[in-house]
Image (cartoon, rainbow, N blue to C red):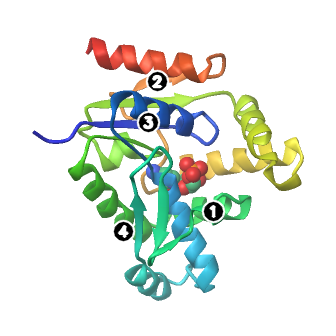
Amino acid sequence: MSPRIITIDGPAGAGKTTVSKALAADLGCVYVDTGALYRGVAYEIQNQNADWEKDEILAEFLTGLDLNFILDGPDLTLVSSGKDITPFIRTSEISMLASAVSARPEVRATLLDLQRRIGMNQDAVFEGRDMGTVVFPDADFKFFLSADISVRARRRFDETGDQGKDFQTVQAEMSRRDHDDTHRKEAPLKPAPDAVRIDSTHLSILEVVARMKSYIQNS
Ligand code: DC
């Protein structure tokens, strides 16, 4: 029997991470944050000072890239060439660079294989932008989680303090990232036609998870 795959897509700050972790814990399967992979690519580009806008340099960079997850607990660890880079991938510079490099088809193709390989081995909840549309079009259950931009920016601001940035800046950066992720040519952020859409503007995490569970149990 092939593994059970659940996808949760949506914009930044919609609550995907907390919801995905809670759902995976509840269903007893692994949770995979695919945004972390794009952040890992951005981190290594920054680290190696790679001129990624040049095609040949990007191709060479991707050939040498060795990213993987350690998926043995509730919090995943992102490893690059054997080194744990998880603590370094959540800055706002990496967020913006991850969004920019994620528009490159070569980057997406490299990560597509890695994501599908992870999905072949175990039941999993995958969170991202194109899980239900591109990476796992045949997923068993697909959800698209959204919320108003002001609520998403407020959550991000309260969670991280975002390195001393004021709320307006956090919201403006989030809105730019939304625009870029939604308008890129390759695998843009959008709900799969068969995804269940949930607006979390007025819902708690527990309520969102309860809706998802009830949908899964009743299908
Ligand atoms: O989910 P996140 O904010 O950590 O993702 C960082 C960036 O990576 C996001 O702005 C767009 C990109 N991304 C993507 O293109 N496809 C995914 N499946 C996940 C993330």
- C-alpha gap between disc 2 and disc 1: 31 Å
Q: Which residue, given by chain and number where applicable, does mark 2 sit on?
A: 197
Residue 184 visible in the displayed image: no
Position in image of residue 209 (x %, y %): 48, 22
Q: Earlier in the sequence, mark 2 or mark 1?
A: 1
- Which label's residue is closer to the chain start, 3 or 2? 3
Q: Which residue sits at x=42%, y=87%?
A: 60
Label 1 belongs to which residue?
A: 87
Q: For residue 127, which numbered disc appears in the image?
A: none
Q: Which residue is mark 3?
A: 8
Q: Is residue 92 left or right of residue 12?
A: right
The residue mark sitting in front, 2 or 1, is 1
x and y percent of residue 171 in the render?
78, 42
Q: CA distance from mark 3 to mark 2?
A: 10 Å
Helix, strand or loop under label 1: helix
On the rendered structure, is 52 left or right of 141? right
The disc labelled 1 sits on which kind of residue?
A: Pro
Vertical relation: 24 (above or below) 179: above
User: Which residue bears the numbered disc 4?
Assistant: 110
Residue 27 placed where, x, y %? 34, 29
How packed mark 4 is, by other alpha carbons closer than 10 Å (few <14, some 14-19, many 20 or more), is some
Q: CA distance from mark 4 to mark 3?
A: 21 Å
